[in-house]
Image (cartoon, helix red, strand yellow):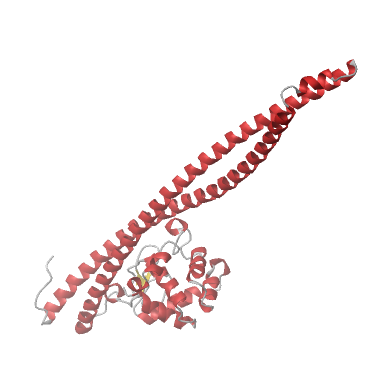
Amino acid sequence: MVEPAGAGNLEGARARLTWLERQIERQQAAIAQQHTRLDAMAGDVAHVQAALQETQAQLATSQQRLADAEARYEASRDRLQGVTRTAYEQGPLAPMEALLGATSLTDLVDRYQYLNSIQVANAEVAGGVADETARLSAATSQLDALASRQTGQSVQLQSHQAALRDGLLDQQRQLAKLNAQRRKAAQLVQRLSLRVDPAITGAGETFGNWAALLVSKLGAPQCQDNLTALVAWQVAEGTAAAHNPLATTHDMPGATAFNSVGVRNFPSLEVGLQATVETLRLPVPSYGYGAILYDLAHCAPAATTAMAINASSWCRGCAGGLYVLNVLPLVQADYSTFATR
């Protein structure tokens, strides 16, 4: 569809607005599809990360098992060396001399039983060394296999994280394009003195600016950890809802429905910020929002705040259980790119 030319009159402006509305709808649909793909990618990251963590735990156990096997092997080898040294010092005829030195039949039987017990003990020592050698070999092989698996899973995780990052950045570009179209639509709406759905004109702020405005509205410090956590939260949502980057369902005057689950389009930045603040301050302890507010108020490390968000009911279980946590390292590594969307 070609953009209408010549919007110098009202009819041309209306035609251009209609064209922009259709473009905005298509862009919103594309962003929704991209978000679905990103959710699947986030699930892949969560799966590989869980497998890697399990391997790392098994590796730690195997390393301890190997250390125990090495200790037992050394002890058994020391005992065998002691037996060998004693046998060498006594010479090969020592058992025979011991038997010939018996002074009575009873003494002979006692000496024979004693020598037999030594031979049995020596055989057990030798057998013990063989057993510990086998266990040591098995533990070493298991450790090598786990180390190889860990390497493979680490590479796989990096690959998935890189793909997720590329997908998120593409989503950022789509959101930026959408907001540019919304700004153009807002200018035409103002010119034509129309009232339209905020979804058409709600361009919003960059993620970084919106994060700064929210912490200010909450009375929290604008420290880098707070801004990073909130930008990561917005990236995790990746929503096209107007003036609602955290996708709250809290209703406000002038809001309209963004999707079927109740996420709202807000008529202005101020209304969207207020709706988010009111949501976070809902007096329902089971929601877990109090922990988020506490962390923001105390400028907790971004990872701590992200864990509180993940543990809350905001989107519990999303992204394979790594909601916000999976994108936080990506945002921390390239904050300026994500914050200036």
Horizontal and vertical percent for residue 18?
18, 72
Asked whether 208 or 115 is in front, the reply is 115
Q: Quadrant of residue 69?
A: top right
Horizontal and vertical percent for residue 71?
64, 43
Work out whether residue 26 can be spotted: yes
Q: Quadrant of residue 134?
A: top right
Q: Residue at x 30, y 72 (%)?
A: 199
Quadrant of the rendering where the N terminus is positioned: bottom left
Quadrant of the rendering where the C terminus is positioned: bottom left
Horizontal and vertical percent for residue 153?
42, 49
203 lies above or below 160: below
Q: Residue at x 56, y 45 (%)?
A: 62
Horizontal and vertical percent for residue 169?
31, 65
Asked whether 84 or 97 is in front, the reply is 97
Q: Residue at x 50, y 70 (%)?
A: 305
Answer with left or right where residue 41 lies relative to residue 179: right
Q: Residue at x 27, y 71 (%)?
A: 176
